Amino acid sequence: MNILITGGAGFIGSHLCKRLLKDDNNVYCIDNLSTGSMDTIKPLKAHLRFTFIHADVTKDLPPNSLPDHIDYIYHLASPASPNHHSSISYHALPMETMMVNTVGTHAMLELAKKYHARFLFTSTSEIYGEPLENPQKESYRGNVSTTGPRSVYDEAKRFGETLVAYYQRELEVDTRIARIFNTYGPHMSDKDMRMSVLFMQQALKNEPITIFGDGTQTRSLCYVDDLVNGLVIFMEKNGLSGEIINMGSTDEKTVLEYAQLIKSIAHSESEISVTEKLPEDDPKQRKPDITKAKELLGWEPTTSIEDGLKKTIDTIRTNL
Ligand SMILES: NC(=O)c1ccc[n+]([C@@H]2O[C@H](COP(=O)([O-])OP(=O)(O)OC[C@H]3O[C@@H](n4cnc5c(N)ncnc54)[C@H](O)[C@@H]3O)[C@@H](O)[C@H]2O)c1
């Protein structure tokens, strides 16, 4: 199969490239390296079936950079970190985030139409905003601010979903939308500063682990290999055009519990500091209902949080 992955040099995209190469596919990775890095795909570059295309999906692609046919397009390109202090967050890259999820999604859908390729869009749990129901089912329409600080991401993803639904409904493109919940694992950028990676770095340096708010807000973290497995099953299974499926872990813990667990697994002497103010629009609860993923895909995460954190901490430790 010829497979195009946008955002393939990012955290999730690099794991997806590796997995699809292992499955004997030809992988074409498009990335503008705005939040990703060549380091994540360095081991893949020598692979004969791997092609890296340095390009921005909101602009014209370099001439003759694509093969004659494309079977699948995974559209992952987008900043994803919500941390206000991160230089690669969607707060730091607001225009880029809005454009890649709208103009970029439109351009990739046009490619899917031209090549008769199946298309998968990585949407996000953030389209549910500050949810009034927990856990969130795919049918929940969300409680989202159109103008709040997170809207550059949330609303761009929502419009991205609208484009995908339109191309499926009216233009006969075979599409799938995966609504991804918090994911963690090796190759998260050290500039990312999402909760899990920040806590792990702080723990390994024996620096205070800083919690926004009082730490009672909850998160459910999914290990990246589990997520990638779910994305691949979702793409490859026939008869799912137009489906929207939540993907994430249902193992809900408070932010304080994660801090304590990471401290313990990293054998760290860090203090846990709960003094930071909760950012505006930061969701208090995030947990997917994954009944649909189980029923339609036979998928659910299988890596325990302890094993996943250990693998991630070991990788970060060797790169520190
Ligand atoms: N990581 C999570 O927990 C999470 C949760 C929900 C949704 N998602 C979604 O999954 C996808 C991947 O997230 P991630 O965590 O790997 O993020 P990431 O920032 O590590 O990867 C995104 C990649 O897209 C590239 N990119 C950005 N704009 C581009 C453009 N205009 N043209 C070409 N490439 C561009 C970046 O350089 C980067 O390599 C995103 O769409 C994100 O919204 C991630």
Image: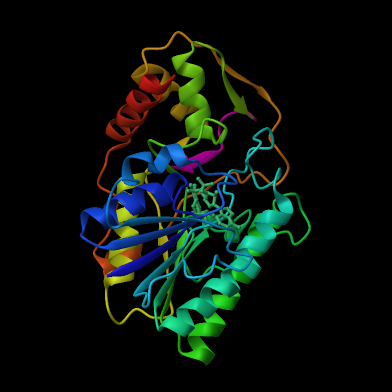
Q: Which quadrant is home to the N terminus?
A: bottom left
Span of residues in magenta: 213-222
Towards the viewer: 183 or 51: 51
Q: Is residue 145 magenta?
A: no
- Residue 219 lies in the magenta-colored region: yes
Instruction: Report how many numbered discs are placed on residues in the image.
Output: 0
> Can the viewer see residue 239 in this picture?
yes
For image coordinates 63% across by 53% down, the residue present is: 130
125 over 86 or under it: above or below: below
View extreme (right): residue: 147
Expressed as whole percent of the image width and height from the top left, the position of residue 174 reads 41, 82
**Furthest residue toward front:** 64
In the shown orientation, is residue 148 left or right of residue 19? right
Q: Please identify the residue farthest to the top as the structure is shown.
A: 269
Say left or right for 87 vs 62. Answer: right
Q: Name the image colouring.
A: rainbow
- Please state the horizontal and vertical placement of residue 319, each as a whole percent of the image: 40, 23
Residue at image point 35% right, 53% down: 16
- The secondary structure that dominates the magenta segment is loop
Above/below status of 47 relative to 257 = below
In the image, taking residue 195 as reference, residue 294 lies left or right, namely left
Residue displayed at 28% across by 52% down: 19
Q: Is residue 228 above or below residue 239?
A: above
Depth check, front residue: 84 or 280: 84
Q: Quadrant of residue 155?
A: bottom right
* One can see residue 292 in this view: no
Q: Position of residue 256 (x, y in %)?
A: 50, 27
- Quadrant occupied by the C terminus: top left
Determine which quarter of the picture holds residue 140: bottom right
